[in-house]
Every structure is written in C-alpha cells, then in structure tokens.
Amino acid sequence: GAVVSQHPSRVICKSGTSVKIECRSLDFQATTMFWYRQFPKQSLMLMATSNEGSKATYEQGVEKDKFLINHASLTLSTLTVTSAHPEDSSFYICSADPSLNTEAFFGQGTRLTVV
Amino acid sequence: DQQVKQNSPSLSVQEGRISILNCDYTNSMFDYFLWYKKYPAEGPTFLISISSIKDKNEDGRFTVFLNKSAKHLSLHIVPSQPGDSAVYFCAATSLNTNAGKSTFGDGTTLTVKP
C-alpha cells in the first residue's frame, strides 16, 4: 500500500524555538495533505489542509501564524510550530491519500515535547 | 458539538470471542466511514471502510455495519486475537472529500485477553 513518511518521530525543544515536521508521500503524489493533532487519550483533531502550490486551509481555532504549513511539492508538506510553548506539546500526525474516497494513509506521527 | 462519537472508551474481550465497537454520528452529510487501528506513538492504520450505499462490508475477520437511519455504525472483529489489542478510531467523511480529511471519534481501546 501507499506509504506516508513523517520526520522526526520525536523532538524535544526549548520554549520559544521553532520546530519543523516533514510529511512525505513516498510512492504517490498528493496535491492535498492533512495535519492532525492528538492530545493524550483524545481524538485526532484536524488542524489544517495543506494544498500544493497554494495556501493552507486552517480549521477554526488553529493559529495560522503559529502553525506554518508549506506544501512546496507534490510529495512534501511541512508543518512548522513557531515560538513553541509547553502547551504545544502533543502528537502531530499527517495524512494523505492517492485518490478520493479511498483509505487515508497516515505518517507515523511526531511526538513534540516543549520544555 | 462532537459529530462522531465512540461512547465506549474501552472494551475487553476474551481471545476467540467477538469484539463489537460502536460509533455514532450526527452529521447527515457524512456518507463514507472508516475504521482505523492505532498503536501508541504511531499513526493510525486503515482497517475497513463503508459507503452509505451499503449496510455491510466484510474483510476477513473484520465486518462493518452501517445503520443510516440510526446514524450508527459498528465494527465486528471475530474471532478476536491478542494482536487486535489497540485503539480503534471511527472516522467519517463525505464521498466528495479526501479520506485523509475525516472527522474522528475519540477512540475505543480494545484489549483482547489470551
């Protein structure tokens, strides 16, 4: 099946610094990718839709200036958490799918810890 | 308002028995539903899906049932195996949308005891 690779799998950073998370579709092109966030024992919450060659679409309540998304190619989307704070500590997951109405393929997730 | 609900946070069953995981939704625009399995510190992996034109879809040990009038779906795993122990997420989307953009329930932690 299709593969979505996410990197890094785990990162610890200091408050006030920025962290970049990469999401790559390895064997298919994805004009659209999605970024989710999961708090402990909670559901995956959609943060934003990453659109290749255009601006990302953010869900209500998600700060676009804090969570910068870039989708520069058909196989790569990046999420940058800017000026990270401890409350940004979470599990971030990306997803993509090769075509409409199929399963979605998820990256392995990134555990971000801000200290 | 949560549009996809999994009211049972946990379920424990004996190996070899049936596991039934339930999911309810409120948005009548949803017409495509997916179940994912997730281990800690990993992304979800797809299990099975169903579109609203069907009321049942089967794949090996996994069967999903959809009751549109009740806005309810369920995942049956039979026979359950210890390796099935994980968190199961129900997700909903529309047929005109990428499956990657779905609304997820809170998950049900399934424990299958040997």
Image (cartoon, helix red, strand yellow):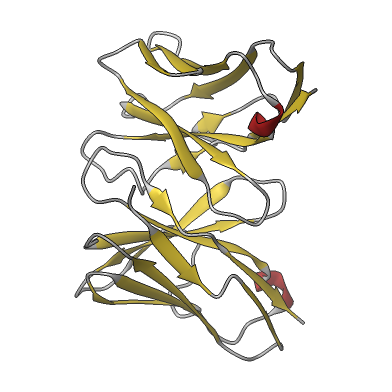
How many numbered markers are drawn? 0
Q: What is the x, y in percent for residue B109?
A: 70, 33
Rendered-image quadrant of the C terminus of chain B: top right
Query: In the rendered image of this protein, does residue B69 appear above or below residue A17?
Result: above
At x 52% / y 22%, what residue is drawn?
B24
At x 30% / y 51%, what residue is drawn?
A97
Is residue B42 at all visible to an observer of this figure?
Answer: yes
Q: What is the x, y in percent for residue A35?
A: 44, 61
Query: In front: B7, or B53?
Result: B53
Q: What is the x, y in percent for residue A114?
A: 71, 79
Q: What is the x, y in percent for residue A99?
A: 21, 47
On screen, residue A98 versus residue A24, left or right, reads left
Query: In the rendered image of this protein, does residue B20 appear above or below residue B39?
Result: above
Q: Quadrant of residue B31?
A: top left
Q: Quadrant of residue A13?
A: bottom right
Query: In the rendered image of this protein, does residue A68 appear above or below residue B69?
Result: below
At x 65% / y 57%, what residue is drawn?
B41
At x 80% / y 23%, what residue is drawn?
B113
Query: In the rendered image of this protein, does residue A84 appear above or below residue B17?
Result: below
Rendered-image quadrant of the N terminus of chain B: top right
Query: In front: A50, or A105?
Result: A105
On screen, residue A113 versus residue A17, left or right, reads right
Is residue B109 at all visible to an observer of this figure?
Answer: no
| Residue situated furthest right in the rendering | B114
On screen, residue A98 versus residue B48, left or right, reads left
